[in-house]
Image (cartoon, grey):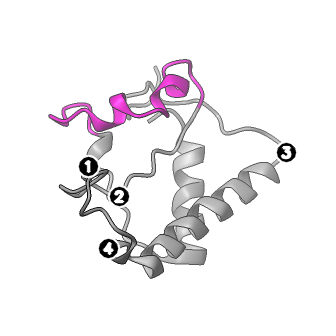
Amino acid sequence: MLSSDLANLSEQVNATYTKMKLDYKYDDPKDPEQIYYRSDHYNFAKLGIPIIFYYDGMLQQDYHKPGDEVSKINFPLLTKRAKLTYFTAWELANRAKRPVVDMDGKGNPKK
């Protein structure tokens, strides 16, 4: 939403290491749930700091209730998500420069 560099890096890392299907529907400013804007990440984004908002979709109905138990975790998928996050952070940490901020926060190029 703020950086095409970061978006390209995320896609490159995914293609190299995890090959997950990434869905950007929650990045849509018209998303009725406004999940992106309610995330903890958004406090950085609104200050112009590029972020990646990793989100696996809506929470289960039993989240933080008695039926919320470890047997419901998809560990192979959780492992892939952790690898995607790790390798993205690794690539960012080993770059000489931070990702350029060239978008307006709504996914449009800055003018």
Q: Which residue is mark 1?
A: 25
Task: Answer whether residue 34 is magenta in the image.
Answer: yes
Q: Which one is in front, 68 or 91?
A: 68
Residue type pointed to by label 1: Lys
Q: Residues within 10 Å of mark 1 (few under 14, many from 20)?
A: few
Report the Cα–Cα distance between label 3 and label 4. Answer: 41 Å
Q: Which one is in front, 37 or 24?
A: 37
- Any mark on residue 56, and which? 2
Report the Cα–Cα distance between label 2 and label 1. Answer: 11 Å
Q: Secondary structure at mark 3?
A: loop
- Any mark on residue 96, and which? 3
Does 35 sit above or below residue 21? Answer: above
Report the Cα–Cα distance between label 1 and label 4. Answer: 24 Å
Magenta region, main secondary structure: loop
Tell me which numbered mark, 3 or 2, is placed earlier along the sequence. 2
Residues at circles 3 and 4 in contact by the CB criterion of under 8 Å: no
Q: Secondary structure at mark 4?
A: helix
Report the Cα–Cα distance between label 3 and label 2. Answer: 30 Å
Q: Which residue is mark 4?
A: 72
Does 111 sit above or below residue 2? Answer: above
Report the Cα–Cα distance between label 2 and label 4. Answer: 14 Å
| Foreground label between 1 and 4 | 4
